[in-house]
Amino acid sequence: MHTGPARSVGTPLTALALVVAVFALVLGGAGAAFAHAGLSGSDPADGAVLKAAPQYVTLTFTESVSFSEDSLRVLSPQNERVNPRPARHVDGKDNTARVELSGKLPQGTYTVAWRVVSADGHPISGAFVFSNGKPSETAAVVATGSPDDTAVGRLYGVFRYVAYSGLALLVGAAAFVLVCWPAAATVRPVRRLLVLGWVALTASTVALLLLRGPYETAGQLTSAFDPAQLGRTLTGRPGGALVVRLVLLAAAAVSLRWLARRTADGTGLGARLRWVGALFASALAVTWAAAEHASAGIQVALAVPVAVLHLLAMGVWLGGLITLLLLLRRRGSGGQEIPASAIGRFSALAFNAVAVLVATGVYQSWRQVGSWEALSTTAYGKTLLVKIAAVVLVLCAASFSRRWTARLGHEASPATATATAALVPAVSAPERVRVAQGVGAPTPAAGQEPGGAAEAPAGDGPGDTAEAPLSEADAYRRGLRRMVTAEAVLGVVVLVVTTVLTGTQPSRAAGERVAVASAAEPQAQVVTVPFDMGTANHQGTVQITLTPGRVGENTVEAVVYTPDGGLATVPELRLSLTQDALGIGPLDAKLKNLKGYWAAYDLRLPMPGVWTLNITVRTTDIDQVTVRDTVRITSLPG
């Protein structure tokens, strides 16, 4: 054991390095967030060709949405806006958006560009086209990238991760002080950790509040200080949650100063103060749960409190680990060492926190994923598998940490008795208690105590300065410190993945979106028929596409290809359909030449079943060929 003065480790630098590592790992996981709702239907439908101009454009989403004045824009072929008024909900349905169009619309293709905010606070956007009378070229240009793949979106994502990190540091350090070791409030690194968590959470909340407006509307970064836009943000649910969070943080600043004075005066922390701290932390967590995944979807009344418990358990466990690691690395000669009893209390607290994390995580996984298949087929499911693997590693590291804690606790009791018996003649009572209970640094040798004689190790002569081997308590302390470090690093990984999950579309919502979209989108029937082009070894093909290929009105498009796969121009193309089993037909499709392809948009088929296509292709002014094939027409869904 070292017989010289105890070395002083730069605890401020250690704290800074740990916090920098947390933020570096968290920010390193920043990525584009995925959409959280989807467009399930529209009227007019995407690609529809209408006989008459519509009066409204209506969008339907998979969950409730909110929007601003420019959320829905309908652009003419000349890129002029033709919806004079902003969007509104249809008949009070929160998952719809409708705009009224101008009175008279010229023929051509119109572009609908939309950007709305889903129920969990994330913007989604898209665009589609419809034609009035006949399709045409359009000059309308809309953004096609992800709503988060912008400067404002990326910056907003970074501050979201900083906010999660600040919550973990603040809640974890406060829980360690209130539950495990109240005297830690007087330790400078712990106090700095509390302040750093508060500053990170407060600064990120202010930034999120300012960026919320341009994040929702795809505005410029400079518009963050627009009073009108900030006013709209404050009236929305995400903005309101951020304002409540700032109020709670202001109250926390006053509470932290009062707590510092109370511990400095030697006043103990009662159970009432612990309950107040728990309520305050819960209120902070609600500002996340009420504005993200838990607030949308199924079982909201149960999902919100479960999300609150999940966040609190994450903060208590990860923030407490970082606090414990700082105290284990603290070896100043004049500082108070963390007792083994405090380590034992945190071990029990961390075990309960991890148990809550696992239980709430299982429920959230079931709620958001919905099926085993979605674990491997959706982005949310794959990210969740990464989190599960990280949690398994955390549980392994935590089991080793608990073993080292138990060994350290068992070693502390006999060491206390031995040290007390040896030091009674030479050391005053207060110093004897400190040496006996300290587990955060090597136990001083007898020769270092005033009035005591130093015992030389066996085989050493006078003046030999060789260090004695570490005691079992020191070895246990170092082993615990290593495992706590590993557990903290893995905890940061779990925090990163958790934050990414909050920005990823839940698998259940994605599945519902695909199912609804599949039911809403028309299914086309495509038939390719070869025909003789009238010259030796020249056989072309004609491709007939019927959309949706069901009973009722259908769109027909026909394209003629040359033998080498190029487009062929023919003087005439006719199509008729018959159903021999029922004696229906022939029904003339009345194809029109649209300069490159032939089409008809009002072919009505009255009955389901197998229909025969009679295709007549005129290859020259005097030559023509007729070919036949069949297509199955289905009945209307439902």
Image: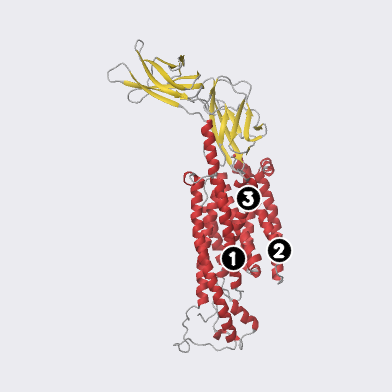
Q: Dot 2: few (<14), some (14–19), or many (≥20) neighbours within 10 Å?
A: few
- Residue 131 lies, in percent from the top left, at 54, 24
Q: Do the CB atoms of the residues marked 3 and 2 lie less than 8 Å apart?
A: no
Query: Label 1 amino acid?
Result: Ala
Q: Is residue 338 visible?
A: no
Q: Quick one: label 1, few (<14), some, or many (20+) residues within 10 Å?
A: few
Q: Are marks 1 and 3 in contact (CB under 8 Å)?
A: no
Q: Position of residue 403 (x, y in %)?
A: 52, 69
Where does label 2 land, which residue?
A: 273
- Tag 2, which secondary structure? helix
Circle 3 Cα neighbour tier, 10 Å, few/some/many (<14 / 14–19 / ≥20): many
Task: Decide which of tag 3 and tag 2 comes sooner along the chain.
Answer: 2
Residue at 71 percent of width and 63 percent of height: 273
State whether residue 525 appears in this view: yes
Could you say which is closer to the camera, residue 485 or residue 579? 579
Residue at 32% of width from left, 23% of height from top? 563
Q: Earlier in the sequence, mark 1 or mark 3?
A: 3
User: The C terminus appears in which quarter of the rendering?
Assistant: top right
The dot on residue 348 is 1
| Tag 1 and tag 2, C-beta contact below 8 Å | no
1 or 2: mark nearer the eye? 1
Residue 608 placement, left or right of 267: left
Q: Secondary structure under badge 3?
A: helix
Tell me the CA gap for discs 1 and 3: 27 Å
Q: Residue furthest front?
A: 581
Quadrant in which residue 123 is drawn: top right
Q: List x then y, in percent, for residue 2.
A: 51, 80
* Residue matched to label 3: 288
